[in-house]
Every structure is written in structure tokens, then in C-alpha cells.
Image: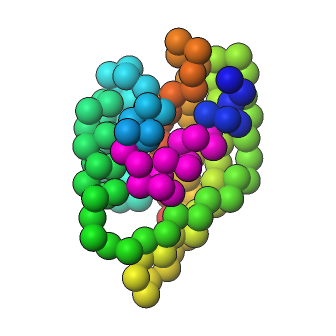
Amino acid sequence: MEFQDGLRAHLAAIDARNIERFAATISRNPDARAIAPDGTATVGYDAIVAAHRAWFASEARWTFDPHIVLMRASETLGFALCDVDYREGASQRRFLLSLLFTYDDGAWKLFYDQNTPA
């Protein structure tokens, strides 16, 4: 699998609010983490999936529209920087999403996610 395919599968799972597809893209490394815009870290597969499960299940009507700004990959690491337009109800915000993937067992898995206000 090419890195772009793993990245697109991850982003598509978010857009579809599909927790099973999303979970399949997350690294099981205990050091995997997601950093929120306020600097709060969610660490480990179970915590990352639980946080996204709650977000996906929320009744809020939101859209997630990422535009890939930069993408680089080696045989075992892949990085993407996305400029995201996020809308929830009448509010809109833009943020930069840094995603670091590792290639594990034949698939690209998200190891590090950092959401930074633009």
C-alpha cells in the first residue's frame, strides 16, 4: 500500500464518521498520540479511538474538509500536513493538521496527530 492510500483512508474515515475504519488506521504503539489545539494529549490506541468515537457519535452537524499541503514518505514513515476547513453548525474554523504515520504489518498507521489553529 502506498502512503497516499493510507492517508486518504484515514481522512475518509473521519469524513464518514466511521469509527471502525478510523480505528483500523491507528497505530497500536502505546506511544501513539493525538494533540488537541489546546495542547491536551490523548495517548494510546484505546484513548485515541475512544475520543474519536465520542466525536463521531456526537449529534453536532460538522464537516471536515482537509486539503493536503505537504506530503512526504520513506519506506517506514509518512508525513502529511493538511489545511482543514472545519464547520460545525454556523461556526467555521481553520486548522493545520500534522499527521505522522508508520508502516506496520503491511499498512500505514497513524502514530502522531497534532491539530494547530491556523
Q: Is residue 110 left or right of residue 84?
A: left
Q: Nearer the viewer, residue 40 or 13?
A: 13
In percent of width and height, residue 73 lies at 72, 28
User: What residue sits 41% from the left and 48% below the top?
Assistant: 18
On whether residue 103 falls in the magenta region, the answer is no
In percent of width and height, residue 13 lies at 49, 47
Against 104, residue 71 (above or below) is below
User: What residue sits 70% from the left and 52% below the top?
Assistant: 68
User: What residue sits 27% from the left and 64% below the top?
Assistant: 58
Q: Is residue 54 visible?
A: yes
In percent of width and height, residue 3 lies at 68, 30
Outermost residue, top side: 105
On whether residue 12 falls in the magenta region, the answer is yes
Q: Is residue 79 visible?
A: no
User: What residue sits 49% from the left and 79% below the top?
Assistant: 92
**Residue stretch rendered in magenta on the structure:** 7-19
**What is the magenta segment's predominant secondary structure?**
helix
Examine the image and state in which quarter residue 71 appears.
top right
Q: The N terminus appears in which quarter of the rendering?
A: top right
Q: The C terminus appears in which quarter of the rendering?
A: bottom right
In percent of width and height, residue 2 lies at 72, 27
Against 86, residue 99 (above or below) is above
Q: Is residue 61 left or right of residue 1?
A: left
Examine the image and state in which quarter residue 19 appears.
top left
Q: Nearer the viewer, residue 102 or 61?
A: 61
